[in-house]
Image (cartoon, rainbow, N blue to C red):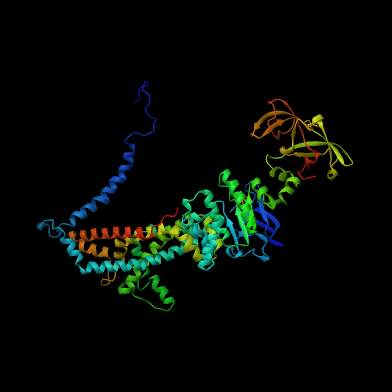
Amino acid sequence: MRASVTQAPAKPNRGYGRWTPLWFLAPSVITLLLIGIYPTLFALVTSFRRYNITRPREGFPFIGFDNYVGVLTDSTFWSSLFLTAKFYVTVLPIQIVLGLAIALLLHKPGMGLLKSLARVTLVVPLATTYAVVGLIGRLIFNLDFGVANQLFEAIGIGRIDWLSSQTGAFAAIAVMDIWQWTPFCALIFLAGLSMVPGEIEEAARLETSSKLALLRYVQLPYLLPGLTAVMILRSADVLKLFDMVFVMTRGGPGSATDLISIYIQRVGFRIFDLGTASAQAILLLIITIIISRLYIRLFYREVH
Amino acid sequence: MTFLRLDNIKKTYGDVPVIKGVSFAATKGEFVVFVGPSGCGKSTLLRMIAGLEDVSSGHLYIDEREVTYEEPAKREVSMVFQSYALYPHMSVFENMAFGLRMAKRPEAEIKAQVAEAARILQLEALLERKPRALSGGQRQRVAIGRSIVRHPKLFLFDEPLSNLDAELRSQMRVEIAKLHRSLGATMVYVTHDQVEAMTLADRIVVLRAGLVEQIGTPTELYDKPANTFVAGFIGSPKMNFTNARVASVSGNGLVLEHPSFAGGKLALERPSASGVKAGDTVIVGMRPEHLTVAPAAPVLALTLDFAESLGGSTQLYASGEGDPVIALTSGRPDLKPGDALNLGIDPAHIYLFSAAGLAL
Ligand SMILES: Nc1ncnc2c1ncn2[C@@H]1O[C@H](COP(=O)(O)OP(=O)(O)O)[C@@H](O)[C@H]1O
Ligand SMILES: [Mg+2]
């Protein structure tokens, strides 16, 4: 099709039609609607209904806030939530400290090839599926041939039955989470450190020879946005942490590793009480949002 | 008394030599300027003095103490960077106080020192502001204030004015000169701008490609440049160079030949040029500001290409058989392009260099 010769073009030919951008955006928007927004809305609606799929004959009537009242008065829900919080405050400080240490080492000048190799290696745990991390964890903490026990025997502590003891299992899932997420912290902090203009770092080096002071007063302000992001992502992620723990311990022994998402999964897909499970999930969503806003208010500072 | 001494300092990056052996000494209270074209290694040299860059070989002394391998903070030097390098998240007060805080000085002393620096640099009204709320000139003042509160042994400046506009630059130049006089401190200042070098320096170190070309006071460099590089670098507009042939040598004098000379020849008294033989090539240098228009005894006979009036003075571009010549003259001579232009010069102001570029 050709435009008529007499008609002056109103605007330069952009090389694409009016609807072209739509087609490029559509797949991601549709995917987002399908796998993000629709399930969330579905869960929201479900959370206000009695929705036990083993008893379909009773129907799925709306029951107002009954599910929420049930959840908030459920002591197992609270103890799972508390355990999740304990898990979070156990792993996150270690991840931040180790990640920062790795970032500082990688930020030092020199040994270019080795460092770029290390940076690539850091991506490996991040690229590993949670379930696979769980499988690796089961191997590492295996009673008979796991590398953890080999190590403990070598230093003379002796074998520990990790996955069958309450503290052992908690420690094991914590170690695997630290293994998987420390590199992420390291990469975020490395990015933050490289944001510090060279001359500002040098100006500080002329004023103090303390590396700690340099970190605290000059580099830290550049790390805060990344730190906030790490804390938010990790709190959301720990609240939904399921696959790795499920593969390693199924929440046991007892309730030693019964994190909140494991509990919700049990309510939803063992007891099939989807109404309660949805209410729990919505509450988690609300908690996540509140925590995120809190972190942003408390820690987030842009450096100009 | 020597206060800062560089002893055959070298720097290589990998296999690439950047500083190829620089030796130099400055006395206490001296204002030394390193000047040279971009990429000649001025910043590298300054950063080695500060300790921000390792020295590949050689020795460095500050106040009688070897500091070649000393940590930057322990050298008691302060530096003003081209980008100001203020801490963006700290107020002006905190920026200036940071070094003192790190040195664990008492709070009362910190307050007093910062207040004093703020008074000298007229920053009192800005102490609570963050750097991003300051203009370029104000940031530069804060950077200078940060370096003076610590009373360092040595002040280092790396092209501190190059991010400022022309007017502010000359204003800050005057302030730095005043500051130097009132503090009596030893300062090393890096610039590629020969005007800054000439106006600020007690002594200038001219660098080229990692080597010292000449060290001297501004007037020494202007009057007795060691070679054509220094002669061309110092002074604005640049010195005019003409390659001339030596026609004859006699006693104290010599006669040079070049088609641009009035009558094709130029006779000079120059006892120092005794090594020159007839037939050699020499380079004749004349500064634009020394040339006079329509003199009684013309030295150059040229044709005017065009004239640029600067208001009070006029810059004349002329050419003959050789390279174009620039002359600077006061007033507005009544000349048109294409006119014959005779230029004269006091023979004492004619510079002579060997064909290799060394002063004769
Ligand atoms: N880190 C580096 N690695 C390799 N070469 C460098 C490095 N830093 C500077 N150089 C080189 O050293 C020379 C001098 O640089 P510099 O001291 O910054 O020059 P100036 O300040 O005189 O403009 C330049 O040619 C530059 O390319
Ligand atoms: Mg430089």
Q: Which residue is pictured at 60% across the width and 63% down the height?
A: B76
Where B358 sits versus A160, above or below?
Answer: above
**Residue B188 vs residue A190: left or right?**
right
Tell me if B103 is positioned left or right of A57 in this view. Answer: right
The picture places residue B255, in percent across and down from the top left corner, at: 85, 36
| Image height of B296 relative to B238, above or below | above
Q: Is residue A77 visible?
A: yes
* Of residues B31 and A249, the one drawn nearer to the viewer in this rendering: B31
User: Residue B69: horizontal and vertical position, in percent?
Assistant: 62, 64
Question: In the rendered view of the protein, which quadrant contains the C terminus of chain B?
Answer: top right
Q: Nearer the viewer, residue B356 or B195?
A: B195
Could you tell me which residue is drawn at 21 percent across and 55 percent down?
A43
How many marks the image carries: the answer is 0
**In the displayed structure, does residue A8 sit left or right of residue B164?**
left
Quadrant in the rendering for residue A277: bottom left
Q: Nearer the viewer, residue A293 or A270?
A: A293
Residue at the far top: name it: A6
Residue A202 visible: no
The quarter of the picture where the N terminus of chain B appears is bottom right
